[in-house]
Image (cartoon, rainbow, N blue to C red):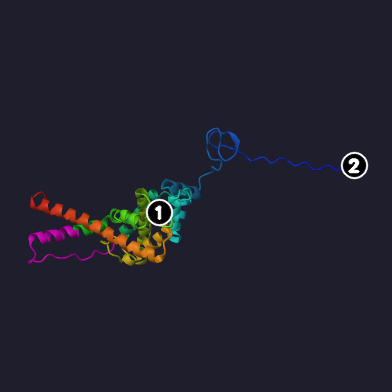
Amino acid sequence: MSRLRRPQRKSRRAPTTHCLNCGHDFEGRFCPNCGQNANTRRLTWIGWWRTFLDVWGLGDTPFVRTLWSLVSRPGHMIGDYLDGKRAGYFSPAKSLAIVAATTALVRWVFPGTENSSVTPTNKQDEMSQWIDNVYNAFETWSGDHILFSLLLAHATLILPIKLMYRNAPLHPSTTIPEGIFIQVFIIIQMLMLAIAWTLVKWGHVSANDIYVFPGWIALIIIAVDLKQLFGFSWWDTIWRLLTSLTLALIILFTVVLAVIIALVFAHHLGFI
């Protein structure tokens, strides 16, 4: 009885690629001689678009995933970033820069309408008129520099939130740098909403306000973020947030009052 011969399996070798850069034939994803990618092909429209996105740091999917996570699961996403799960997300600083540049472009196309300022009357003395001018100038500046205004406003929340959420079930005792990153992600959310709100309103928004949308929407967004991030109940999250906002307003009022007093003295002494 003849023995049945088992068919010999042919060894499957990886396809060989000819490097267009140095002419070396190799197997794998990158040329071992010069390091060029094996997928290098002729230039196409798709390749041009990918190159354009790479210039702005958008060539990989983490940027889109980061923005979508800030919409669908913001607090959990921020918690993942604080826990060190950062490979799947885009850099918050780069994301902030890109979203801020997009916001500036949208506000340039749709500048909005300026709020009517208080017109000085003859009954006001010189100092009152000067304070009104300072307030109007500050309001205009904050509207023209929305990113810096948001950074200054949200910076006042770092210490209050650290204090009020220090015993949270999730992410207790956050550090100051972690608090900075939390606020950066929240600012990105606010800018994204500002872009969408301006486009929906077709530019019929206030040009002088930091938030072009109603303030209660911003309050809800921050509450959802902190609820998911720290794991408190809704009631605990809300009263801690309101207390944090009160403390932040006290800090902001103190800083603004100190600046105004300094300007008043400088004006009185003739420096300005």
Q: What is the tally of numbered marks visible in this picture?
A: 2
For label 1, the SS is loop
For the point 33% across and 67% down, which residue is it? 216
- Hey, what amino acid is under mark 2? Ser
Q: Secondary structure at mark 2?
A: loop
- Residue 252 seen anywhere in this rendered image of the structure: yes
Q: Is residue 233 magenta?
A: no
Report whether 216 appears left or right of 60: left
The residue that appears at 14% across and 59% down in the rendered structure is 131
Estimate the x, y position of residue 197 in percent, counting from the top left. 36, 64
Residue 183 quadrant: bottom left
How many neighbours does mark 2 have within 10 angstroms: few (below 14), some (14-19), or many (20 or more)? few
41 versus 125 height, above or below: above
Q: Position of residue 250 (x, y in %)?
A: 24, 59
Q: Amino acid at mark 1?
A: Pro
Residue 7 badge:
none
Does 269 sit above or below residue 119?
above
Judging depth in this view, the residue of 225 and 174 nearest the camera is 174
Q: Residue 193, position in %: x, y?
A: 37, 61
Outermost residue to the front: 167
Where in the figure is residue 209, as x and y percent of width and height? 27, 62
Instruction: Compare marks 1 and 2 and give the one earlier in the sequence.
Output: 2
What is the magenta range? 111-136
| Disc 1 to disc 2, C-alpha distance | 76 Å
Q: Is residue 52 above or below residue 253?
A: above
Q: Is residue 196 visible?
A: no
Tag 1 residue = 172
Judging by the rendered image, the residue that carries numbered circle 2 is 2
